Image: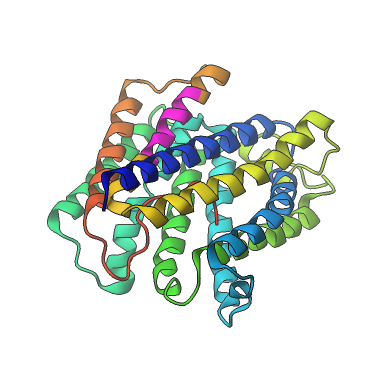
Amino acid sequence: MRASVITQGILALCAGIAIFSVQDLILKRLSGDYPLHQAMVLRSLTALPFHLAIVWWFDGRLSTITTPGWWKMLARGLLNFTAYTAYYLGLAALPIATTVALFFTAPLFITLSTALFFREKVPFASGLAVVLGFTGVLLIVRPGASGLGWTALLPILGALGYALSMVVARPMGRTESAAAMAFWGNSCFLICALALSAVFGSGTMVETADPSLAFLTRGWIMPPLRDLALMVSCGVIAAVGLTLLTHAYRIAPSAAIAPFEYSFMFWGLLWGWKFWGDLPDALAWVGIAVIIAAGIYVIRQPAPETAAPPVPGGDPA
């Protein structure tokens, strides 16, 4: 593998991560005024034609989305929908950097999941890294002290859901293309967001006391043109970012480029500081560093045959 190809993969991945970070910034900005399901519907509708183009580009035909396994891809999309809904609801109440750091426990959950469901042996050092990673979580959350409250569980729940979706992706990937899985993931987002809109869209069940619950239960609101453009732009961001990440993993070994997924932390810290004045305290900094170190160690280990790509991608597909 030429070094230039690895460099291209790293650059494509970092560019995709940077683009995806803007989606988090937009959704956190909108979370105080609009419901998550409204933003999801508009985002998924906008992304739909882009995903079809991605299928055509990478697979050379559209028939890969109509294989007999389409329902499995849709079911996997439900796992991702649950994962990222929890993540976005946590984002409404927590600083971006904290939310991202807690979500990056996903590689640790993937290690545990492959051991549990596929009986893969986890080396002692990897097991120790998992334990240390969750110790980092405790340093950030600090339950029972001046901690973050129940909303800190949301990105962790999101990480668990994402890990499970990645674990089932590897065996599924033997018969289905990555672009087709992304298409059905986006389709599931659209279906589920419409279902949430049917339940909460009227606004009669709104809960405003908690930022996360308000982001879930608020009714649809007619946005001004600027906010509508922000919601729609999330679909473009998702499509472009996913294309860059897919390209990165197609041309370069995952072990060489996967650690650069953690560049997401830089953007989370930057956006949180610039727009909300949020910076972690000393213990949270230590916790973030421990999670990153543990995650990088885990994803640098040789991946078991049944395991999925060991890092969170920027997109729910």
Q: Does the magenta stretch include residue 268?
A: yes
User: Dividing the image into 4 quarters, which one contains the C terminus?
Assistant: bottom right
Q: Give the range drawn in magenta.
A: 261-270
Residue 38 in picture, x, y percent from top left: 75, 46
Q: In which quarter of the image is residue 69?
A: bottom right
Q: Quick one: which residue is furthest to the left in this view?
A: 124
Residue drawn at (33%, 65%), measured in percent from left and top? 307
Residue 295 in picture, x, y percent from top left: 29, 45
Determine whether, in the image, residue 118 is placed left or right of residue 12. left
Q: In this view, does 41 lie above or below 147?
A: below
Whether residue 167 is visible: yes
Q: Is residue 76 above or below residue 53?
A: below
Determine whether, in the image, residue 95 is placed left or right of residue 304. right
Residue drawn at (81%, 43%), measured in percent from left and top? 220
Residue 2 in picture, x, y percent from top left: 27, 49
Q: In this view, does 78 lie above or below 3?
A: below
Q: Look at the magenta stretch and give its main secondary structure.
A: helix
Q: Does the magenta stretch include residue 276?
A: no
Foreground of the two, 24 or 261: 261
Whether residue 210 is visible: no
Residue drawn at (38%, 29%), measured in percent from left and top? 145
Q: How many labels does the image show?
A: 0
Foreground of the two, 297 or 50: 50
Determine whether, in the image, residue 72 is placed left or right of residue 189. left
Residue 62 in picture, x, y percent from top left: 64, 70
Foreground of the two, 5 or 227: 5
